[in-house]
Amino acid sequence: MARPRDPAKREALLTAAAELVAQLGPTASPAKIARQAGVSAGTIFVYFPTKDDLLNTLYVYLKANLRRHIHTSPEMPWPQRMRRAWDDYIDWGFTHPLQARALAVLSASERVTPQTRAEAQTIFPEFEKWGAESRDSISAEAAGEGAPAGFLDASFYALADMVIAHGTQQAEEAAKTGSGAADKKTASAGKAGTEKTATPVAEDSELAERRERWRQAGYAMFWEYMQRQPGESYFSARLDFK
């Protein structure tokens, strides 16, 4: 008889997997993940028969957590919808830095199958819609003749991940130097969609201002790039990031 599965243990395993994948990459061992989750080494295989099963399930799990934090509406014009998606994505990444890092790692991993990526994409049906609308609204000349359909989407995620990584690094450095000590917050583990962080994240006004500048600069880069003429260098964009 198959052993009954406890949803709380499954959640603990996925939370632990996200933390360790963020820190160690996809080579994080099942034994370490089980230990981090507080279960026996054999228990992990009750829920995920192979390491690849775990990684692919984690990828969809993280995408679903991200989706719950993005509040777009089909009624929004596509530029507003895209900007709202950007802001919500950045906020999720700043609030859940380990999950954001783990998702970035898995997005670049060949161990996540095309089938899993297609499954995760169905979580964001409106993203496909605004992606198509944005591509239709930007002339072929501006978007680049023959550019792959997913290129703008990939650019969106790459720039957003860069902003999240930089903002998280700044927060960790600020925490280490004591900046914003009165305002330090540490997320707790054990709740669905939450994580614990190794370093408390300082949220002071100076850090918030720097993060906001990077948020704005990243989106300006993305928007400028979408309208760039063929042959122009990406780095020739005239943007003021002061």
Image (cartoon, helix red, strand yellow):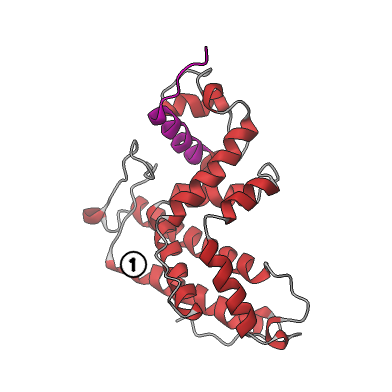
Q: Main secondary structure of the magenta part?
A: helix
Q: Is residue 180 above or below residue 84?
A: above
The residue positioned 44% from the left and 28% from the top of the image is 36
Asked whether 214 or 175 is in front, the reply is 214
Q: Is residue 158 left or right of residue 186?
A: right
Q: Is residue 45 left or right of residue 38?
A: right
Q: Is residue 9 magenta?
A: yes
Q: Which residue extends farthest top?
A: 1
The residue positioned 51% from the left and 29% from the top of the image is 33
Q: Which residue extends farthest left?
A: 182
Q: Tell me the residue that label 1 is attached to.
A: 208
Helix, strand or loop at disc 1? helix
The residue positioned 41% from the left and 30% from the top of the image is 7
Stretch in magenta = 1-20
Q: Is residue 201 left or right of residue 104?
A: left
Q: Amino acid at mark 1?
A: Ala
The residue positioned 54% from the left and 85% from the top of the image is 239
Q: How many discs mark residues in the rendered view?
A: 1
* Residue 151 place in picture, x, y as percent: 68, 69
* Residue 178 place in picture, x, y as percent: 30, 53
* Residue 231 place in picture, x, y as percent: 76, 85
Quarter that holds the C terminus: bottom left
* Residue 140 place in picture, x, y as percent: 71, 85
Asked whether 221 or 77 is in front, the reply is 77
